[in-house]
Image (cartoon, grey):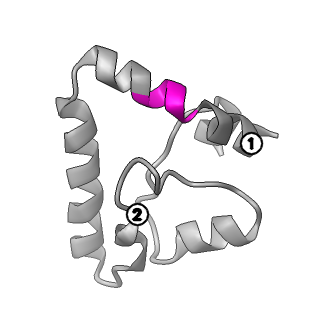
């Protein structure tokens, strides 16, 4: 819940279908900005590798691009906090 409270984007490193469950509760996720198909991967190791790829891709961006990405997400971040 910390990322939601502090209006931060998140990647769930947890059980399969957790994002699907959050969406059913009314939360929005970040499928407009990265591939969230990791949520459907049943094998924990494969799911972790898919999550790590997303994190590495974001880390490889320069600071200005990450700032722009976060600005584009602002409405989703605010929605989740509310």
Q: Is residue 72 magenta?
A: yes
Q: Is residue 26 left or right of residue 70?
A: right
Pointers 2 and 1 in contact (C-beta within 8 Å) = no
Residue 23 falls in image quadrant = bottom right
Q: Position of residue 55 (x, y in %)?
A: 28, 44
Q: Nearer the viewer, residue 21 or 44?
A: 21
In the image, what residue occupies the spot 20% across and 63% down?
49
Mark number displayed over residue 36: 2
Q: Nearer the viewer, residue 18 or 71?
A: 71
| Residue, disc 1 | 79
Q: Position of residue 11 (x, y in %)?
A: 44, 52
Image height check: is 12 above or below 77? below
Residue range in magenta is: 69-73
Is label 2 in a helix, a strand or a loop?
Answer: loop
CA–CA distance between discs 2 and 1?
A: 19 Å
Image height check: is 1 above or below 40? above
Q: Position of residue 39 (x, y in %)?
A: 42, 71
Q: Is residue 25 left or right of residue 19?
A: right
Disc on the earlier residue, 2 or 1: 2
Q: Position of residue 14 (x, y in %)?
A: 45, 66
Count of picture labels:
2
In the image, what residue occupies the spot 71% across and 45% down?
80
Is label 1 in a helix, a strand or a loop?
Answer: helix
């Amino acid at each position: 819940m910390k990322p939601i409270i502090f209006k931060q984007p998140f990647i769930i490193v947890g059980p399969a279908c957790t994002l699907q469950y959050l969406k059913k509760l009314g939360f929005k996720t970040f499928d407009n900005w990265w591939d969230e198909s990791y949520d459907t991967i049943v094998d924990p190791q494969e799911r972790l590798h898919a999550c790590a790829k997303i994190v590495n891709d974001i880390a490889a961006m320069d600071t200005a691009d990450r700032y722009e990405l976060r600005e584009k997400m602002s409405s989703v971040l605010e929605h989740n906090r509310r």
